[in-house]
């Protein structure tokens, strides 16, 4: 027998308790005993047991049913076997209803106990093997916390390894929620700068003047509120990597400043006259089509070419449906720990439902959807019913767009999202797959009333 499995026998009758413990030890198990429910709970808090044999009637303190219920508060999956000399249909039903795995009658038969334990341990071994296999499967398709078996993503993983130690600038393009920052981190942590800083800056989250100070730092007295000298993100990232997220949203003046630092590797703090030199690898990311922005005069062509030395275009989730089951199971495994929920898997019906969804918000939307389902789920496996809130979302809408500019179309989409959410900017941003700060900036830019 496998000696790594631990068993706890709880009975106020010392002879019964020690006899059962001796039988189980002969089978090779590690066995502890407890003379009361209180002692059993104390031992359970210190160690998790594979099986708990609990006497139904214990005169002192709490009885067997109460002990079992308290054990299950500590370990929801606890396998509890109730033992008693007073066998009735009512007590059996009561024990099973409260969560007992089995119900046996005294005097206990050593052979019966041995067979019962063998059956329970066999199931636990299978559960453990399934968990290990699931972890191996996820590990097989995991690259620096990015889960995928899609052919295009595999090409990206290979490219990341090839360019990781180069100094060349990288431009990562893809829709919101596709994992652009994860790819940027993978580049940094796969290369020779791994022991140097990785700093990410959201260019869409700050106003132009604040972003300039955030990137390049400022001197004392450079502007109202600049009470002391401050280093910028480029200085802090010296020797390492800086990710300029949502680079397509920066203002023309900052575009020029970035061009200078890419060309000369030098910059000036806001309000400063001293030139500073840095060795920083720049990775830029955006959901904006920069080529189109260049044509419209919104983005400098020379800056675009400086950024677009190595281009990585991440496919949206709707083009990599084979990743949905892997991602979903990975999110379930991680979120079950973060949320404190005992949810171990997701059903085939639920996966089918997820595969049929459009995922306009990509991987971020999928993660939020899994989390929402887990919060309300009452079972150990997420089922199709836990995703009923997706029923109102159609997979594809066939629509012929009227003739309008991209700005006009974006404004119309934002207005529609705000109407759907009754002006709730946070919810609208989630639906649109963008940061709330980005949506606030766009509302201000288009002067959209809320």
Image (spheres, rainbow, N blue to C red):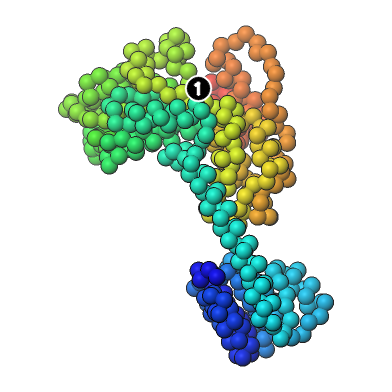
Q: Residue at x 82, y 77 (%)?
A: 90
Q: Position of residue 386 (x, y in %)?
A: 69, 46
| Closest to the observer, 186 or 236 | 186
SS class, disc 1: helix
Where 300 falls versus 430 (above or below)?
A: above
Q: Position of residue 318 (x, y in %)?
A: 60, 28
Where 441 falls versus 424 (above or below)?
A: above
Quarter of the picture holding the N terminus: bottom right
Q: Position of residue 212 (x, y in %)?
A: 33, 28
Question: In this view, which residue lies farthest toward the left?
Answer: 274
Query: Which residue is labeled 1 in the image?
Result: 445
Q: Position of residue 420 (x, y in %)?
A: 67, 31
Where 157 falls versus 34 (above or below)?
A: above
Q: Residue at x 67, y 89 (%)?
A: 59
Residue 403, picture quadrant = top right
| Closest to the observer, 397 or 310 | 310
Query: How many discs appear?
Result: 1
Left or right of 259, for residue 143:
right
Can residue 22 be spotted in the picture?
yes
Question: In this view, which residue lies farthest toward the right?
Answer: 89
Quarter of the picture holding the C terminus: top right
Q: Residue at x 69, y 77 (%)?
A: 112
Left or right of 112, for residue 215:
left
Left or right of 411, for residue 251:
left
Where 206 falls versus 8 (above or below)?
A: above
Residue 319, picture quadrant = top right
Can residue 34 be spotted in the picture?
no
Q: Residue at x 64, y 88 (%)?
A: 16
Residue 184, picture quadrant = top left
| Closest to the observer, 283 or 8 | 8
């Amino acid at each position: 027998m496998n000696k790594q499995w631990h068993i706890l026998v709880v009975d106020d009758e010392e002879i019964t308790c020690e006899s059962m413990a001796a039988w189980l030890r002969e089978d090779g198990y590690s066995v502890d005993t407890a003379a009361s429910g209180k002692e059993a709970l104390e031992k359970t808090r210190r160690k998790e047991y594979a099986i708990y044999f609990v006497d139904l009637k214990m005169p002192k303190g709490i009885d067997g049913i109460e002990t079992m219920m308290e054990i299950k508060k500590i370990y929801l999956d606890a396998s509890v076997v109730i033992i008693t000399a007073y066998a009735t249909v009512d007590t059996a039903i009561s024990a099973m209803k409260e969560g007992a795995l089995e119900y046996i009658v005294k005097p206990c038969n050593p052979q019966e106990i041995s067979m019962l334990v063998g059956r329970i341990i066999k199931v636990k071994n299978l559960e453990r093997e399934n968990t290990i296999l699931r972890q191996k499967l996820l590990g097989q398709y995991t690259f620096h916390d990015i889960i995928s078996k899609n052919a295009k993503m595999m090409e990206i993983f290979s490219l990341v390894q090839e360019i990781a130690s180069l100094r060349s600038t990288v431009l990562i393009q893809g829709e919101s929620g596709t994992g652009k920052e994860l790819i940027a981190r993978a580049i940094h942590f796969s290369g020779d700068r791994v022991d140097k800083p990785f700093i990410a800056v959201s260019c869409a989250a700050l106003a132009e003047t604040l972003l300039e100070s955030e990137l390049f730092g400022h001197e004392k007295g450079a502007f109202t509120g600049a009470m002391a000298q401050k280093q910028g993100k480029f200085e802090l990232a010296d020797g390492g990597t800086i990710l300029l997220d949502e680079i397509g949203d920066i203002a023309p003046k900052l575009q020029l400043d970035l061009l200078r630092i890419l060309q000369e590797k030098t910059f000036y703090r806001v309000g400063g006259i001293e030139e500073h030199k840095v060795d920083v690898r720049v990775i830029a990311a955006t959901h904006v089509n920069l080529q189109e922005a260049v044509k419209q005069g919104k983005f400098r062509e020379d800056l675009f070419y400086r950024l677009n030395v190595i281009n990585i275009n991440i496919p949206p989730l709707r083009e990599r449906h084979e990743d949905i089951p892997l991602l979903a199971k990975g999110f379930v495994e991680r979120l079950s720990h973060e949320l404190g929920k005992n949810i171990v898997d997701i059903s085939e019906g639920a996966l089918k439902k997820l595969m049929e969804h459009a995922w306009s918000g990509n991987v971020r939307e999928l993660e939020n959807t899994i989390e929402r389902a887990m919060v309300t789920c009452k079972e150990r496996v997420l089922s199709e019913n836990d995703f009923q809130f997706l029923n109102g979302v159609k997979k594809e809408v066939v629509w012929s767009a009227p003739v309008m500019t991209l700005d006009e179309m974006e404004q119309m989409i934002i207005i529609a999202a705000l109407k759907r959410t009754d002006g709730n900017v946070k919810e609208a941003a989630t639906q649109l797959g963008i940061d709330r700060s980005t949506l606030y900036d766009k509302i201000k830019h288009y002067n959209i009333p809320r």
